[in-house]
Image (tube, grey):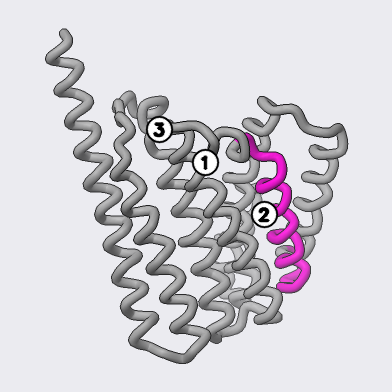
Amino acid sequence: LAAACWLASNVAWLAEAPPAYVIGGWLGFLVLTIAAERLELSRLAPRPRHAEPLFAVIVAVLLAGLALAVAPLAAAGLLGLAAWLARYDVARRTVRGHGLPRYVAVCLLSGYAWLAAGALLLAAAGGYGPGPLRDAALHAVLVGFVLAMVFGHAPIVLPAVAGLRVPYRPRFHVPLVLLHAGLAQRVAGGLASEPGWRAAGGVLNAAALTLFLLLVADAVIRGRRNVHEKG
C-alpha cells in the first residue's frame, strides 16, 4: 500500500495534478512504510485481539482521505495511527530500559507525538493549499515523525543492511533534541508569522541532521577500530 501511494503520487506529479493528489500520496508512502514496520514489531508484545483489525480500519481511513484529497479525513487517519502506535508499540516497554533500546524508544515516542501534532495541524488547515498551517503540518510529519524514525532506526538498520557496526553512544540524544527544538521553533514561527523564527528553526534542523550523520560516522569508525584491536 505504501508503494502504491508512492507510485500514484509520482504519476499525479508527472501529470501535473493538483498538489493535494501529490503531497498526500508521498505522505502516505513514508507514514505507511514506517507504520508497517512497527506493526510487525508490535507483535512481540502482548496486545488485544482487536488491535490489528483496528490498525486496518485506521489505514483504510487514511487511504480514503489521501485518495479523495480530503485533508480532514486523512488527518483523522494520521491521528488514529499516532494513537495506535503510541498505545501498542513495544517502545512503551523499552523506554524503561537503558542504552540503545531506551534511545530508540525515545525517538519513536517523540515521533508519534509529532505525527499527532501534524494530524491536528492538517485538520486545522483543512486542505493542502499553501499556508502556515500546511507548512507546519508537513514539517511535523516529515521532519518530526519521519526523521525521528530515521534517527532511532539507524543504529539497527545500518548493521543489518550495510554490515556497518554502529555502537550506541549517549551523545546520539543531542541531535534528536536539536531536531525537535528546531522543528518546534519552525512551527511556532510559521503560526506566529515570524520569518526569523522559521529560518532559525530550519538552521537547527539542518544542524541536527548534520550532527547526527557525523556521530554515526564516528561510531562506525570507532566500531571498526575496536573490531581490529580485538582481532
CA separation in Å, label 3 and label 2: 25 Å
Quadrant in which residue 16 is drawn: bottom right
Mark on residue 105? Answer: 1
Q: Position of residue 66 (x, y in %)?
A: 71, 64
Q: For this view, does 67 lie left or right of residue 20?
A: right
Query: Residue at the location (35% across, 72% down)?
Result: 202
CA separation in Å, label 2 and label 1: 14 Å
Question: Is 9 within the magenta?
Answer: no
Residue indicated by mark 3: 99
Query: Residue at the location (74% across, 64% down)?
Result: 67
Between 217 and 6, the residue placed more toward the observer is 217
Q: Secondary structure at mark 3?
A: helix
**Mark 1, residues whose alpha carbon is within 10 Å: few (<14), some, or many (≥20)?**
many
Q: For this view, does 73 lie left or right of residue 160?
A: right
Can residue 215 be seen in this snapshot? Answer: yes
CA separation in Å, label 3 and label 1: 10 Å
Q: Amino acid at mark 2?
A: Ala
Between 63 and 14, the residue placed more toward the observer is 63
Q: Amino acid at mark 3?
A: Gly
Q: Residue furthest bottom?
A: 193
Between disc 3 and disc 1, whose residue precedes?
3
Q: Report the magenta residues as a range.
A: 67-90
Residue indicated by mark 2: 82
Quadrant in which residue 116 is drawn: bottom right
Question: Is 73 within the magenta?
Answer: yes
- 207 relative to 69, above or below: above
Q: Nearer the viewer, mark 3 or mark 1?
A: 3
